[in-house]
Image (tube, rainbow, N blue to C red):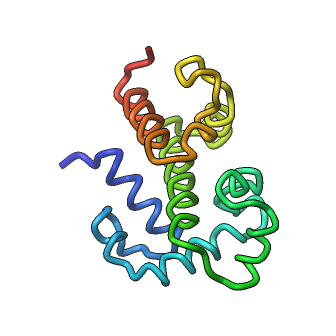
Amino acid sequence: MDITLDDRLNGSLGGLLGLPGATDEAALARTDRSILGARLLKALTRPAPKALLAPADVYRIIPRRTWIRRKAEGTMTVPEFDGLYRLVRLKTLSELVFQDVDRAHAWLNSPKERLGGATPMDFAGDLLGYEAVQGWLHEIDQGYFA
């Protein structure tokens, strides 16, 4: 049985969030949101180079002053969690597709004509944009480069 890109993505996310048994979307979705939120917050506050997202990426979703407060409180709102989780998922997916952290970073942070001049990380700030970029990464993984 072949391991799909989504299987590898979910396994990677489970490992990044300290949930090695969560190897599919359903297992991640069944995880208590307070536990998942706390794990994501902890992973996002690791010092570089182990941080899941650069501070500038976090600030796309949560303003800097609010982020400082969230870290001190140890909690996030549901929309904040959803937005940050999408960006972590997108970053992880791009690293799997490009098989190189630097190439993935460059692709995510370079303006794309297909996105009207926006970078994939900027475009993925909401659900519709995220789904478009995710779909594009799946196309690239399948060999469609147009």
**Front in this rendered view, residue 60 or 102:** 60
**Front in this rendered view, residue 13 or 121:** 121
Q: Is residue 119 above or below residue 125?
A: above
Q: Is residue 92 above or below residue 143?
A: below
| Residue found at x 28% / y 49% | 3
Q: Position of residue 7 (x, y in %)?
A: 32, 54
Quarter residue 50 falls in = bottom right
Q: Is residue 82 left or right of residue 31?
A: right
| Residue found at x 34% / y 65% | 23
| Residue found at x 48% / y 68% | 15
Quarter residue 112 falls in = top right
**Front in this rendered view, residue 18 or 42:** 42
| Residue found at x 81% / y 67% | 65
Q: Position of residue 54 (x, y in %)?
A: 73, 54
Q: Is residue 21 above or below residue 86?
A: below
Q: Position of residue 120 (x, y in %)?
A: 58, 35
